Amino acid sequence: MLLNEFLILAAFLFCTGVYGVLARKHAVLVLMSIELMLAGVNLNLVAFGAFHGDVIGQIFALFVLTIAAAEVGIGLAIVLLIYRNLHSADLDDVDTMKG
Amino acid sequence: MLLAVATEVISTPKFDWHAFAPDLVLVVTMVVVLVADLLLPDREAWRTSSITALGLLGALIPIATLAHSGHERILFDGAYVVGHYALALKAFFILAAYITVLLSVDYIGEGDYYNGEFYFLLLVAVFGMSIMTGARDLITLFVALETISIPTFVLAAFRKHDRASNEAGVKYYLIGVLSSALMLYGFSLIYGVTGATKLSGPHSISEYLSQHGTEPLVAVAIFLSLVGFAFKVSAVPFHFWAPDTYEGAPTPVTAFLSVASKAGGFVALINIIYFGFLTGNAHSAANSWWPVLWVFAALSMTLGNLAALRQTNIVRMLAYSSVAQGGFMLVPFAAAGIAGADGPLEKANSAMGAVVVYLLIYGAMNLGAFAVVIAVARRTRSAEISSYDGLFQISPTLAVVMGVFLASLAGIPFFAGWFAKFVMFRSIIDAGTGWAIALGIIAAVNSVIAFFYYARPIRAMIFHEPTADDRTPIVIPQPLVAAIVLTTAVVVVVGIYPQLFARVGQLAF
């Protein structure tokens, strides 16, 4: 069956996400990049689930989806907080502490 | 007819209410706190802290009865196991949360903070930790880890209008989510190769590893998962969020993060390594993962200590010290892997016991140190080490107690910290190979370096003249006194009579 194609696509999504997290400075884009990484994870899980012929992979993917939604909710709230206090959502501006 | 067939196929799984009682008490307390916060007028909102404290202590009762009944309870086809190990750590997390509540009562009550929400989030995090202790399945492990992380993101950013707190929250959040994503990618590969998410038992990850050894893809998957955990326990080189988050977050939250949340990461690591990678014959595959932990341990100890030497702020110093202490706690993992790769599992068992003992002792001494920091900051409004000048003349008791905690963190006998270091070094000697001894030497050198920075506040307290004009003793509110007394008692009693915790470590494994 088709497995490698899915895994390559998942790895590509994951790597794009990692690049986005490291290279992007805008908080919302970083959040989106993290979502890309999780999409890669989900694709992996579902593809492996189909490959093994069991439902564990899909159940795991459901849990990942749900928790990712909760996480992004919290993340957007924190970004909003930063935007209100700093009038910017640029992560380079969030560096008052050093050392 | 169809219905009859259906009910036969879908039978209700047997549910052991007793095994779940501690967690259920926590859930009920959460709901009560939320409702009470809704109903109470603003000036009585502090009562939610009493409810939280009572709920936490109430959760200890079923833990005691479960410990008394003795046998291991296996739930959900082995995905959740309540035995001595889980119970000991549940009790630890609940007591750590209780002390955090004692630290928070006045801090949160006096600031313009949201009382009910604070304690609710704290309880959710503790619930996650409680679930983590029993998790024996990748999915349970992941859900428990996120149940710990998500509320603590909010707690770190709890002072809404304070930029430092915002920064603490955003850094902790981004690193937390990134590490979860890396860990999940590792989990998805582990599942893909082994076809299982359960850690041990039939049709599990450990069974697969026993039969097939390590394939390159499994090694990559394990590496990614371990990197995810390294973020959670702030191991070098994934520690850079910790000092900023610890400094910016409200101090009671910092105490909670540095003890309970970090311990949550370590418990996850114990579960996956001990139950997933070391049971059965799976330990023959240990060569694929112990070098990673060896490097994390060596780097965390060395860089954590060197960075702590440079700090002038005591919270940042304690943050780097907790990075270094995390390194010491990673040592037994590496030792267990080295010992496991050779064969006999008894050594790996005692190494895991060492981690548990270290966690318990580290929890008491670090919470105590933060309790004193909070007490002193009530007067000085500062966390600079220079604000400790002459504390011995102003509040002798507070200065002595702080000295006890710092000496314990440094590992001076006869305070509890020396025993933590002792079991850590014993796990290295048990493993006995060249690599283990090398790690032991690095740990020994670092224990010496640590003396220098732990001694700095002590020197400031005793030998410097107080700079402040106000020389009356610092008034400490009762809950804070209770927290300091409790933690001091543990540090002193366990230091003199270490068998107390050694027994817990032995019972657990």
Image (cartoon, helix red, strand yellow):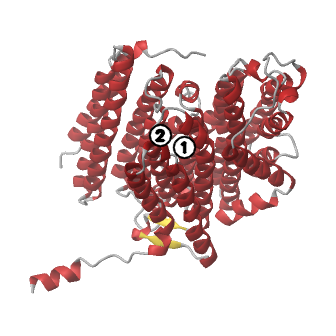
- Along the horizontal axis of the image, is A26 left or right of B395? left
Badge 1 sits on which subunit?
A: B
> Which residue matches tag 2?
B152
Mark 1–mark 2 contact, CB under 8 Å?
A: yes
Residue for point 46% across, 33% down: B158
The image position of residue B40, as x and y in percent, is: 42, 50
The image position of residue B482, as x and y in percent, is: 71, 49
Residue for point 60% across, 52% down: B98
- Along the horizontal axis of the image, is B509 left or right of A78? right
CA gap, disc 1 and disc 2: 8 Å
Q: Which quadrant does the C terminus of chain B fall into? A: bottom right
Residue farthest along the left direction in this orientation: B1
Amino acid carrying label 2: it is: Thr
- Along the horizontal axis of the image, is B328 left or right of B276? right
> Which residue matches tag 1?
B261
Residue for point 52% across, 51% down: B47
Which sits in the foreground, B350 or B409? B409
Q: Can you see residue B194? A: yes
